Amino acid sequence: MAMIANLQYGWTLFVNPIDAKYHWGRAAIQVAFSVFVLTETWLVPVEGWFVDRFGPRLVVLLGGALVGVAWIMNAVAGSVIVLYAAAAVGGIGAGAVYGACIGNALKWFSDLRGLAAGLTAAGFGAGSALTVLPIQSMIAAHGFEAAFLFFGVGQGIVICGISWFLRAPRANEAAAASPASLQPLGRQYAPSEIVRTPIFWTMYAMFVLVGAGGLMAVAQLAPIAKDFRVDSVPVTLLGITLPALTFALSIDRILNGVTRPFFGWVSDHIGRENTMFVAFSLEAVGIWLLSMFGETPLAFVILSGLVFFAWGEIYSLFPSTCTDAFGTKFATTNAGLLYTAKGTAALLVPLGNVLATATGGWHAVFAIAAIMNLVAALLAILVLRPSRRAHEARDETRDALAAE
């Protein structure tokens, strides 16, 4: 998971250098980011189908090979078409790794499903934190092409090597580790069934609403910092002095990883929907504060960290809620179907550039993102929670009748 993190979270470091060399325009270059996220998410259900039937090892092995090939293609891309093709290859590879690892965690640890999904997803959220400075240094010293080539090959090799240590739980192996009260109900929903439930589409809509704002920040943080004129301003925090953008990228990656197991653990104890309400509301506040005070270098570093901390938990809360509701048998495929919402949200990322250009700044983009998070927070409490309770009551009634 850590080895696929740079494909998404390291991308913002390459946008300005690519534009400086080829002058394709940031909006055109960011289409590659959307292509990556679309292929990374929308194909996860297909990859999850293979994982549920054949185990995670082969799927992750093939994913690692594609991850390496994708950044090699980026290194030699001489047109936006090749850049988009590389994004598609990388998306397929990253999706295979992501879907397999999350699905495996959901199956292994049903007693602390939120924490397990969060710890696994933390590798993706924080995995690029240690490589922010090395990538920036390599781009500055040798060009973005060398950075793509070196890190692409390295990441692919590590994924392929580690894939051999993955396996799914054997019969009754995971169940034996969980208290009886936490065992899944007898009803195990197939992918074709969950898409006919209102719970699934409520979660899907919430995922899109929250995901869009966070993805915009992931893809656009470097351009935003440049437009705010804080990107190269030195900031001192906790005795460390770094340029504001470099500092923000490092802290953001760490907090984006920490938040996933943290809020996953919280949701195991106070409930998924209550945790969603708190996190999504915090995200709305963070985005609004960033729009108001982000032109101050220190505030930019701190508030962007808050935005990432309040955003990354969606990657533990939604898959664990999905598996809670629909069972573990098809957990990888079902969570993969829900994960396609991230791809839908990515379609909105290039529109951020368009809106920022049209309005002369990022404030309108931030305002819309904050409102979307508030709507998602209210949906968690007012719609998802009662819908899931009714769904669980129907399952319990059916199980009771079947036992008579």
Image (tube, helix red, strand yellow):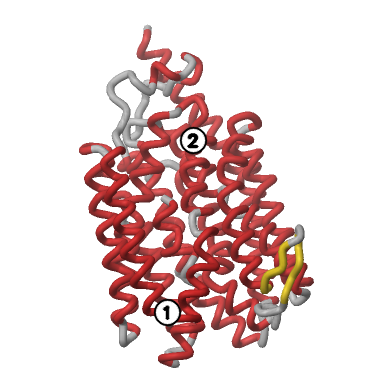
Q: Position of residue 289 (x, y in %)?
A: 76, 65
Secondary element at tag 2: helix
Q: Residue furthest top?
A: 404
User: Which residue is located at x 45 percent, y 69 percent?
Assistant: 347
Image side of residue 356 versus residue 117, left or right: right
Q: Position of residue 104 (x, y in %)?
A: 36, 37
Q: Is residue 271 above or below residue 29?
A: above
Q: Is residue 196 visible?
A: no
User: Which residue is located at x 62 percent, y 33 percent?
Assistant: 271
Image side of residue 206 versus residue 286, left or right: left
Secondary element at tag 1: helix
User: Which residue is identified by label 1?
Assistant: 144
For mark 2, does the 10 Å Cα neighbourhood hold few (<14), some (14 to 19), or many (20 or more) residues?
A: many
User: Which residue is located at x 25 percent, y 58 percent?
Assistant: 65
Three-letter amino acid code of the residue under disc 2: Ala
User: Which residue is located at x 41 percent, y 20 percent?
Assistant: 398
Please report whichever mark, 1 or 2, sits nearer to the chain's N-terminal start.
Answer: 2
Q: Quadrant of residue 373?
A: bottom right
Q: Position of residue 273 (x, y in %)?
A: 61, 39
Which image quadrant: the C terminus? top left
For mark 1, does the 10 Å Cα neighbourhood hold few (<14), some (14 to 19), or many (20 or more) residues?
A: many
Q: Is residue 232 above or below residue 268?
A: below
User: Which residue is identified by label 2?
Assistant: 116
